[in-house]
Amino acid sequence: MSLKKTRAENYPDWYQCVVNEADMAENSSSPGCMVIKPWGYGLWERIRDIFDEKIKSTGHENCYFPMFIPLSFFRKEAEHVDGFAKEMAVVTHSRLSMQDGKLVPDSKLEEPLIVRPTSETIIADAFSKWIKSYRDLPVLINQWANVVRWEMRPRLFLRTREFLWQEGHTAHASAAEAEVETKQMLEAYRELCEDSLAMPVIMGRKPEYDKFPGAVDTYCIEAMMQDGKSLQAGTSHFLGQNFAKSAGISFVNRQNQPEFAYTTSWGVSTRLIGGLIMTHADDEGMVVPPKIAPYQIVIVPVVKNPADEDAVMTYIEKIRQDLSAQQAFGEKIRLKIDRRDKSSVDKFWEWTRKGAPIILEIGKRDADGANVMVKERIRLGTPEGKQIVSRVEFCTTAAQRLQTIQQAMFERAKARLLGNIRTDIATPEQFKAYFAESNQWIEDGKPAKVAFVRGKWSGDQNSDELLKEMKITIRCLPFDQSGTQGTCLLTGKPATLDVIYARSY
């Protein structure tokens, strides 16, 4: 039972259908914003909990900073304010009053406040008060918060005016220590995406012109969506001493000399859920990796005769007890029994749309035979996707089933990524012809018309204009540089840098 729009018919509309039919989010009456509904927020909670544990295991602590930032803080770092100026929401008044029967702004603020687009400046201000000596370093903090960036073309999860994220901020006594931190957290993002979201990524460094405003270096992870476009899934920034100098984060070093600290920042957001959709969903709806599924197993009672209800529900309770003793990925299996007064068919398709990894349909026949009807979401529509197995067998192997599904989802996405990186384009003419094509969704096992190109770049800082003309971007300079000589695919000049070219979200 396909969605109203399929990938082949209209990829953007298909994406919206997946979000709607999986009941993950909806557009808010507040323009450009979204309401994240329980299933969508449940995904974010799982991402948050998994990554929060990683953050703490690497020595960071959580805290919270105000969402209102004085405009003067941004003005201290000129490159930073220039980079965010067009996205800032500004508070200029503190209250409203009635004038001629209308509500109008009343008390003008002495200084405008920016609604947090990112927190480097206000956290740098706090660091300047906390840090006085090398003994105060390093400072390793993180906050889970909301941010506001005034998007003009909002799209659920991918770009909304308010979204959720985590942002880590650290201060160090040396550049080398700060760079280690920057790359350590990028690796933590890779691990989150690949091990938990089953979403393979390419790690690399952003070109100079595309760095985070005010950063010395920006590192990123890039994921390939099913239409061949790239999604920046996470970034980690080495800020050098730029913010430290503008905010006055100085300390007395071991040689008893004053010195500015070296800082970093890094973050991922609810955009990851958009990446999940475009990595794993199909024409029937969402497909959720078991590690981050709010419910890994959903049981749908099938009661055709009211007289059978007690027997069916008693049998389901035995299954629940059996599964409660099992662990998957080091945690208790997350299970839901759907007792709502709806038809079993409607409930099955609802959980299919939501992408629950395993759906069990249990009726009187199953109870009498001590069996379960197992439907694995990733294999929907295949002979392997629907199986009748004994209750004992299912309950003792449920954890392994979930692990197998998780691995299968990653391997399928990894094969799609590796199978759609072109490395055989050698000249600017071939390059332009390739990106003259239109994107399409990638059928498993079939190459895309347009996806990623790995090729040479001369490093020419005027490249941005050429890229805009072609409506593509340099996603990153991958860490595994070949060091070979070649021809820049943009300018035809001699080049040694390997880059990933792609269209992007």
Image: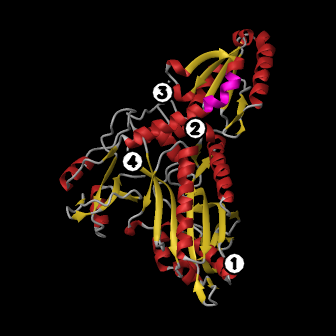
- Residue 434 vs residue 488, the one in the foreground: 488
Q: Check disc 2 and give the amino acid type.
A: Pro
| Quadrant in the rendering for residue 180 | bottom right
Inter-mark Cα distance, 1 to 2: 41 Å
Q: Are marks 4 and 1 in contact (CB under 8 Å)?
A: no
| Quadrant in the rendering for residue 108 | bottom right
Which sits earlier in the primary sequence, circle 1 or circle 2? Answer: 1
Residue 289 is marked as 2
Label 4 Cα crowd, 10 Å radius (few <14 / some 14-19 / many 20+): many
Q: Is residue 483 left or right of residue 254?
A: left
Residue designated by label 3 = 2
Q: At numbered mark 3, what does the secondary structure look like: helix, strand or loop?
A: loop
The segment highlighted magenta reads 394-402
Which sits earlier in the primary sequence, circle 4 or circle 3? Answer: 3
Q: Nearer the viewer, mark 4 or mark 1?
A: 1
Q: Is residue 218 visible?
A: yes
Q: Nearer the viewer, mark 3 or mark 2?
A: 2
Residue designated by label 1 = 136
Inter-mark Cα distance, 3 to 2: 20 Å
Q: Is residue 342 visible?
A: no
Q: At numbered mark 2, what does the secondary structure look like: helix, strand or loop?
A: loop
The residue under the point 51% across, 67% down is 237
Which sits earlier in the primary sequence, circle 4 or circle 1? Answer: 1
Q: Check disc 4 and give the amino acid type.
A: Lys
Residue 102 pos. (x, y %): 64, 66
Residue 229 is marked as 4
Q: Nearer the viewer, mark 4 or mark 3?
A: 4
Inter-mark Cα distance, 4 to 3: 23 Å
Label 2 Cα crowd, 10 Å radius (few <14 / some 14-19 / many 20+): many
